[in-house]
Amino acid sequence: MLPFPVLYALSSFLYFILYHLVGYRKKIVRNNLKNAFPDKTDAWRLDVERKFYRHLTDMILETFKGMSMGREELMKRLKNASQELYDKAHEEGRSSIIIMSHTGNWEWVCMSAQLHAQQKAQCIYKQLKNPFFEKLMLGIRSKFGTMPIPMEQTLRVLASQHNITTATAFMGDQNPSNGKNAYWTNFLNQDTAFMWGTEKIARKTNQEVWYMQIRKIKRGYYEAHTRLLCTNSAETQEGEITEMLVRATEEDILTQPENWLWSHRRWKHKRLD
């Protein structure tokens, strides 16, 4: 219920605790940045590191602020710069899979999706083990009509929606449970495993694949830019869609590196020989 100026004052205090006192996952963040940007100076990486923690605490409190935000406030703070793309797809009856990464405020995107899209807006999510937080996050994400779908139910739900137009958001930079059956490629200067799920679902349902970049304009304000990656998904070669989303994600991160989730254990798997 706090007004935004007070919220961000609290966020600055939380940043001090999280970064300077607790050092939350600082070793992971520092190692990820060093491996992703080996040619950058220590000073540059340290600057990105500090900015990341400031963004992280902002994003955490912004997410919970969603519980009390009205639709006008949300749409003012998160602009859809590609509204025409969504409107045209709806008019032509084309369903789409929208790939995002953990940049900007992806939770606000999920929460506001149905406010921007005329088609049925959905977001795929990984269920939380804690029942309280699972219920809380479902409430925030579905507040304005967006339909959250558990990751395990994705194909079944999308396959049943062949008679309606949908826009379904996926997180494309999720770490697979293991690297054995993953798609391996070079990502941010490292051998990286990606999940096949998004590509397999796109090819199975033959939906268009889009990529959404969430740019941070200033503190508390974001702009979503969406572009087409692939039209005839069923006709693509194996690995083609995944490689496209990898390159789009990498380009996204390089634009505003401080706004990606560097505390994520993204590179814990190693490719098996």
Image (tube, rainbow, N blue to C red):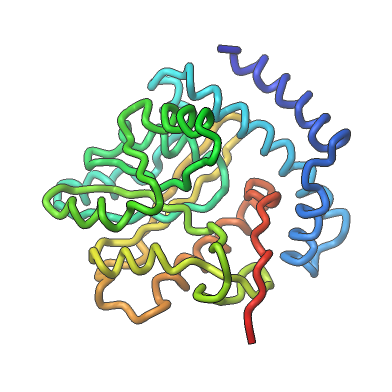
At x 36%, y 40%, the residue is 148
In the picture, the quarter occupied by the N terminus is: top right
From the top left corner, tell me how far across and down residue 112 is, in percent. 39, 33
Q: Is residue 247 above or below residue 238?
A: above
From the top left corner, tell me how far across and down residue 187 is, in percent. 61, 70
At x 42%, y 18%, the residue is 70
Q: Nearer the viewer, residue 155 or 162?
A: 155
From the top left corner, tell me how far across and down residue 163 is, in percent. 11, 51
Q: Quadrant of residue 273?
A: bottom right
Q: From the viewer's perspective, tell me whether residue 248 is left or right of residue 80.
A: right
At x 49%, y 37%, the residue is 107
Q: Nearer the viewer, residue 55 or 273?
A: 273
Q: Is residue 245 above or below residue 258?
A: below
From the top left corner, tell me how far across and down residue 7 is, in percent. 65, 19
Q: Is residue 142 above or below residue 125?
A: above
Q: From the viewer's perspective, tell me whether residue 159 is left or right of residue 214.
A: left
Q: Nearer the viewer, residue 161 or 12?
A: 161
At x 57%, y 68%, the residue is 178
